[in-house]
Image (cartoon, coloured by chain):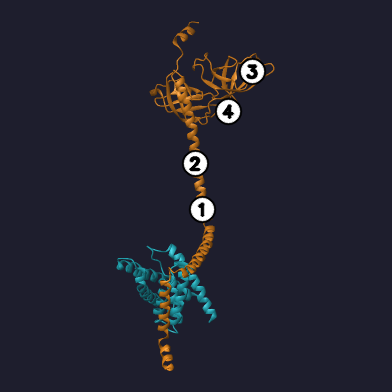
Amino acid sequence: MFKWLSEFYRLSKNYIVFALLLSFSFFLISVNNNVHTRGLQTVGLLTTSYLENLVRSVTDYFSLSSRNADLERENAQLIDLTAKIRRALIENDQLRAMLKFRDKTSAPLTPANVIGRSTEGGKSLLTLDVGGNDNVHVGDPVVSGSGLVGNVIVASGNFCLVRTLFDGDSRIAARLTTAAADGIVIAGKFGELAMKNISRRYVVGKGDVVETSALSTLVPAGIVIGFVSRTADETGNIFKEVDVQPAVDLSSISAVFVMQYARPTEAVDLEKTR
Amino acid sequence: MTKKLLGYVGLGVLAIVLQKFLDDYAAINAVSPQLVILFVIYVALREGQLFGACNGFVIGFFQDLLVTHFLGFTSFVAVIAGFVAGFFYKENDVELAAKNLGFVWISAIALFVSELAALPIIASGELNYFNVFLKFTVGTTVYTSVFATVIVFINGRRVRYV
């Protein structure tokens, strides 16, 4: 009997083991949701999580350069976005100021966009997208919400060129509101303006408002030009040295008004009779 | 023998790790090449039916424990694959083990039989058995056979030039 059994096992050993292994596999499948195997499954799950975490930290290390490139790209986009937002905020402020200015003034105003800037050889010119077709004429004053920008010197059908206060040839009759003194505003040093012909007898302080004078034949009176930033009395000079911080930031200006201004004809005629 | 056994353990661990990657990155519509089963077939062709089936159970158990988290399923498939592959075991024919195209045919047969046997487990709750058969039985067999062809090609070249 034993011999027969031993012979049977020798011949069918593979099948017996196979059947046992299959049975045990079935048993494992059947006890998958059993409470006793949960512990084993948890251990497996934790081991896998730990190993995956380990692998991920390695792959993360190798993907650092591409992540860095992505972040640099994102950073560039954010910088661009911030610049756009900042530009929009500045433009918003300018437009609000322009709206206030429009409500205050009675002269007809033509809105215009600044489409070009030129600051070569002592010149400081702006190109606007309005011209003769928009009723813009040579000599018309150009203003922003903050104050005077300059005067139109050339006008074509759809465009015009503006000489700003910083141009070497610009001369604007101006008035110090506190001292009630008239003078001439010209381009100064380092992005500032200078006010000339102010007698030393006037008391001029830092922060005093400088605006266009009623004596001007080019611009109406009362438009802000800037604020006094420095005054000095030089020995042997009967006039004060007055530096003026301009009210308008020409580097960021994007929209302006062209004023249709003409001196009252009666005053002009009267001046001609002299 | 111990050295050989340790070699198989190392290969088995590598197969499980690679299987995890294949499941994550090479799966097409939830069907991935069964590298662990290929390893079981490879061992069965080198060591015989009994060793192949036992190896299938052990590696299948660890695969279930660490990757699938469904205890018994891979053991079941791998035991059948190892057992079927063991029929093709020839003591003096080492070339058959992943070095010529015979390995691909044997793998395809062993895989098809084992996946077919596992079909009732995979398709439990499914109404359309034929779709599951096409997707998992045929799909896995074809995909894994393609993978086996690549292994044979690489292994054959390596053996030829070394």
Q: Residue at x 37, y 72 (%)?
A: B118
Q: Secondary structure at mark 2?
A: helix
Q: Residue at x 50, y 70 (%)?
A: B14
Disc number for residue A191:
4
Q: Are marks 4 and 1 on the same chain?
A: yes
Gap in Å between the C-alphas at discs 4 and 3? Answer: 20 Å
Image colour assigned to chain A: orange
Mark 1, Cα crowd under 10 Å, few <14 / some 14-19 / many 20+, is few
Residue position for label 2 = A80
Mark 4, Cα crowd under 10 Å, few <14 / some 14-19 / many 20+, is few
Q: Which chain is cyan?
A: B
Where residue B26 appears, as percent x and y from the top left, is 42, 64
Q: Give whichever of B17, A190 is nearer the camera.
A: B17
What's the residue type where badge 4 is placed? Answer: Gly
What's the residue type where badge 2 is placed? Answer: Asp
Q: Is residue B122 left or right of residue A172?
A: left
Mark 2, Cα crowd under 10 Å, few <14 / some 14-19 / many 20+, is few
Q: Give whichever of B109, B127 is nearer the camera.
A: B127
Q: Chain of mark 2?
A: A
Residue position for label 1 = A67
Residue B98 visible in the snapshot:
no
Disc number for residue A240:
3
Marks 3 and 2, the one that precedes in the sequence: 2
Q: Chain of mark 1?
A: A
